[in-house]
Image (cartoon, rainbow, N blue to C red):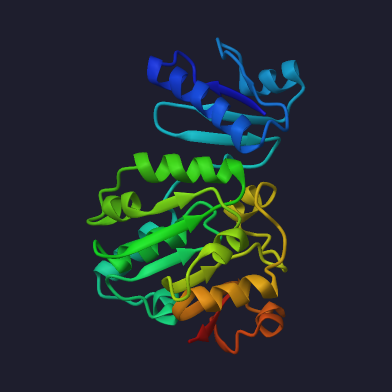
Amino acid sequence: MLITTSYDPQREQLELADRLAAQIKELKGGQGNVRRVRRARISLAQLCLTYDDPDILLVTRERIEYYHEQQPALFFHPSTAAIRVKRLLNGESDTLLEMAGVRPGDRILDCTAGLGSDAVTLSFAAGQSGQVTALESSPLPFLLLQQGLGEYVSDIPGMTDAMRRIRVLHEEHLDFLRRQDAKSFDVVYFDPMFRKPIHESNSIRSIRQLADARALTEEAVHEARRAARRAVVMKEHRDSGEFARLGFAELHRSTSKIAYGVIRL
């Protein structure tokens, strides 16, 4: 992976690029080729050719962007969370929040945070007295999420505070769950990579190559049931067999291709 900046970077961008290079090397345990390269006036395509590397992490004044070959750029943005929070402010409902039974003050564990759209919505609903812990096991999505939640500023009331309240950890969810006391969280949430991909989603297509593609295990659900006080929730493709395999009897299927399964405790 190449790490560089936009043209004519300020000192802040140069320092951030250096920090990210060091962080990625550490998170990868020294594995993989991570190179911090100077941009000068060279295009991203030319950098890829020069260094024979298809992966670039670009630090700009506005955000961090990840490029891989012809895939769309991947970067942190509240995306659908912004739409969902606006709807909540207008008094509308949210399927995930209803299925999870989220209340102000709840402690919520998002085991598969990705780029945090669900975590932001959950944090907004849990409010200032609540706490969302978001786990992401893949190094690059973790760094994009951590940086984005700490830097992004939204003009939607309460949105920025909801992002800042999220605790982001670079953790495997099963390892984390095993260490938790019983009933440590009100709700435990899983959004694993769908067994049946939704190919038309650009954001999912961009992150799929980076994310942990392993299926959710029965042990993880067992540990989630132990760590949760009220509910374990999973999001999957509406036609997925994972709900039945993992014991999610209560389902909500909509006209979209997304469904939620719930285990009430």
Residue 139 or residue 222, whichever sits in front: 222
Residue 193 position within the rendered picture, expressed as x and y whole percent measured from the top left: 65, 62
Residue at the top extreme? 40
Residue 233 position within the rendered picture, expressed as x and y whole percent measured from the top left: 52, 76
Looking at the image, which residue is at 27% across and 52% down?
161
Quarter of the view holding residue 36:
top right
Q: Is residue 130 above or below residue 64?
A: below
Residue 144 or residue 185, whichever sits in front: 185
Q: Is residue 256 visible?
A: no
Looking at the image, which residue is at 59% across and 24% down?
3
Residue at the bottom extreme? 249
Q: Is residue 52 above or below residue 227?
A: above
Quarter of the view holding residue 222:
bottom right
Looking at the image, which residue is at 72% across and 80% down?
241
Left or right: residue 64 compared with residue 122: right
Residue 170 or residue 243, whichever sits in front: 170
Q: Is residue 117 above or below residue 216?
A: above
Query: Quadrant of the image for the N terminus?
Result: top right
Q: Is residue 163 visible?
A: yes
Left or right: residue 102 compared with residue 204: left
Looking at the image, which residue is at 61% across and 59% down?
175
Quarter of the view holding residue 187:
bottom left
Number of dots carrying numbers: 0
Residue 146 position within the rendered picture, expressed as x and y whole percent measured from the top left: 45, 43
